[in-house]
């Protein structure tokens, strides 16, 4: 728990075109914050698996001046991340992780925004031999009911003498064009769009000394 005391309060004035002006008004403003983090893991030898879980909670309260009115702002951020690592065979490992991210903002106890972001990741590591590695990665995003799918496959062959790594990677198999991400702060919500490189195959040779 922390309390920060500022000698100014931000004044935000929204313009007719949607932009807003920010001005620092000389007045006392306290920011109250709560941060809670917990994590745990457990290995089960019978199934050669490790389970992990992480939980985070952040809450922040402060004051701001919006269009001349003094308002109380509150932001809540909660993340929940369970994962599992399984050794299916001596030549095969599997990993799964789900990250849930929730953001809520309030102005004078009135809910302004509610953002949900869920990310699922599944990976397989296959070792045909000591010198070979086949990696398969798949991801599924859900941002405010919008779905995105991604997948990559890579193969690596290593030679000890000379020290060479041959690798081929097939990226963005589903040829996803872009994905959206959301952030929130006080009275604003940002939507960011990230454009991705198209479906491609890249082969490379790496030298080690």
Image (cartoon, grey):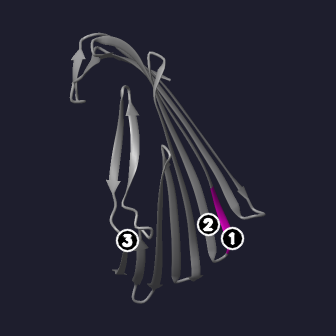
Seen at 67% across and 68% down, the residue is 87
Q: Is residue 88 magenta?
A: yes
Above-or-below relation of 108 to 169: above
Q: Nearer the viewer, residue 90 or 176?
A: 176
Q: Secondary structure at mark 2?
A: strand
Q: Are marks 1 and 3 in contact (CB under 8 Å)?
A: no
Q: Give the residue pinned by disc 2.
A: 94
Please tell me which of labels 2 and 1 falls first in the chain: 1
Residue 199 is marked as 3
Residue found at the very far right of the displayed protein? 46
Q: Nearer the viewer, residue 1 or 92?
A: 92
Q: Nearer the viewer, residue 95 or 145?
A: 145
Residue found at the very far front of the displayed protein? 16
Quadrant containing the C terminus is: bottom left
Task: Give the image location of residue 30, x and y in percent.
Answer: 38, 15
Q: Are marks 2 and 1 in contact (CB under 8 Å)?
A: yes
Above-or-below relation of 100 to 91: above
Please indicate, yes or no, whether residue 208 appears anywhere in the rendered image: no
Please tell me which of labels 1 and 3 falls first in the chain: 1
Give the dominant element type of the magenta stretch: helix, strand or loop.
Answer: strand
Q: Which residues are magenta?
A: 84-89
Q: Give the residue pinned by disc 1.
A: 88
Seen at 46% across and 80% down, the residue is 156
Task: Give the image location of residue 150, x and y in percent.
Answer: 46, 63
Relative horizontal placement of residue 142, taking residue 64 as reference (left or right): right
């Amino acid at each position: 728990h922390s309390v920060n005391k500022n000698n100014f309060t931000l004044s935000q004035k929204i313009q007719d075109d949607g932009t807003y002006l920010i001005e620092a008004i000389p007045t006392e403003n306290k920011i109250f914050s709560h941060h809670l983090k917990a994590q745990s893991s457990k290995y089960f030898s019978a199934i050669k698996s490790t389970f992990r879980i992480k939980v985070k909670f952040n809450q922040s309260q402060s004051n701001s001046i919006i269009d001349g009115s003094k308002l109380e702002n509150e932001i809540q951020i909660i993340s929940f991340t369970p994962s599992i690592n399984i050794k299916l065979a001596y030549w095969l490992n599997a990993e799964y992780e789900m990250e849930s991210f929730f953001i809520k903002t309030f102005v004078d106890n009135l809910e302004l925004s509610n953002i949900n972001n869920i990310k699922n990741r599944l990976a397989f590591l296959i070792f045909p031999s000591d010198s070979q590695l086949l990696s398969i990665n798949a991801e599924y995003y859900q941002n405010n009911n919008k779905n995105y799918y991604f997948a990559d496959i890579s193969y690596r062959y290593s030679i000890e003498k000379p020290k060479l790594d041959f690798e081929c990677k097939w990226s963005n198999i589903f040829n996803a064009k872009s994905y959206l991400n959301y952030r929130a702060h006080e009275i604003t919500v940002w939507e960011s769009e990230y454009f991705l490189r198209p479906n491609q195959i890249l082969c490379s040779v790496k030298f080690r000394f």
